[in-house]
Amino acid sequence: MRIDILTLFPSMMSMFFAESILARAQKKGLAEVVIHDLHDYSLTRYGSVDDYPYGGGAGMVMCVEPLANSIEALKAQRPYDEIIYTAPDGRQLDQPLCNTLSLKNNLMILCGHYKGVDERIREHFVTMEISIGDYVLSGGELAAAVISDAVVRLIPGVLGDEQSALSDSFQDGLVAPPEFTRPVDFRGWKVPDVLLSGDHKKIAQWRYEQALERTRQRRPAMLDD
């Protein structure tokens, strides 16, 4: 998979992909993340890519021309399965969407900033708009990093144990059950006996019941769905 990220702050983005799972995925050749500086497509000698909104009002808007030029330059090099815009009013990011995106070959993510992008970019170039929550960030860089992380970790071979991703919260419509590790007894707080039994059928049943109860307590709307 290749992910191209268009941003006003490339140095901010670089650090997200230099460590941990995302870095390992790239070293293994399973994913490639390329960061593009939108200032490189500016039409002014000062490198500006924003202007005041028509109709007045506070804030600035990312201009249509440099954004269109950057998107078209990348599309000329390869076809994209999705051109994603990070927007507060976009589709809420969830595990099924991450699963779907993990099957794609080429993704482009446009990071919004200021008051957002000229609407013509959304109308004529963007194929999917994604929000990571009902709140507003200073820019879409954090959202782009979240989307990339959630998607890349699902690619086969990225995680050391491929079964790990399948047992994550939300994969089966439930949150994950509690987990324990050594020591068995810490300050009198003990690991449940069933996890020490070696009976895999009982352990699986216990984990399902725990996941169901935890979902009922913490995310009851998931059970309604």
Image (cartoon, rainbow, N blue to C red):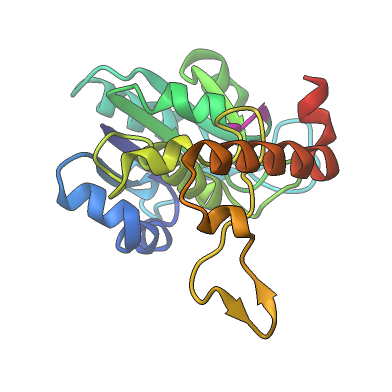
Q: Residue at x 67, y 52 (%)?
A: 137
How many numbered circles does the render carry? 0
Question: Residue 158 or 61: which is nearer the viewer?
Answer: 158
Residue situated in front as seen by the camera: 132 or 42: 132
* Residue shown at the point (24%, 54%) measured from the top left: 24
Q: Is residue 67 left or right of residue 79?
A: right
Q: Decide: is 43 above or below 18.
A: above
- Main SS, magenta region, reads strand
Quick check: can you spot residue 87?
yes
Outermost bottom residue? 187
The image shows residue 19 at horizontal and vertical percentages of 32, 64
In the visual, does 90 lie left or right of 153? right
Q: Position of residue 158 (x, y in %)?
A: 28, 44
**Residue 49, horizontal then vertical, whole percent:** 48, 44
Q: Is residue 224 above or below residue 4?
A: above
Q: Is residue 83 visible?
A: no
Identify the image quadrant of residue 218. Answer: top right
> Which residue ends up furthest to the top in the rendered image?
124
Q: In the image, which residues are magenta?
A: 90-94
In the visual, does 19 lie left or right of 148? left
Name the residue located 27 percent from the left edge and 28 percent from the top edge: 74
Q: Is residue 128 left or right of residue 75?
A: right
Q: Quadrant of the C terminus?
A: top right
Does the magenta segment cover residue 209?
Answer: no
Which of the pair 78/124 is nearer the observer?
Answer: 78
Q: Quadrant of the N terminus?
A: top left
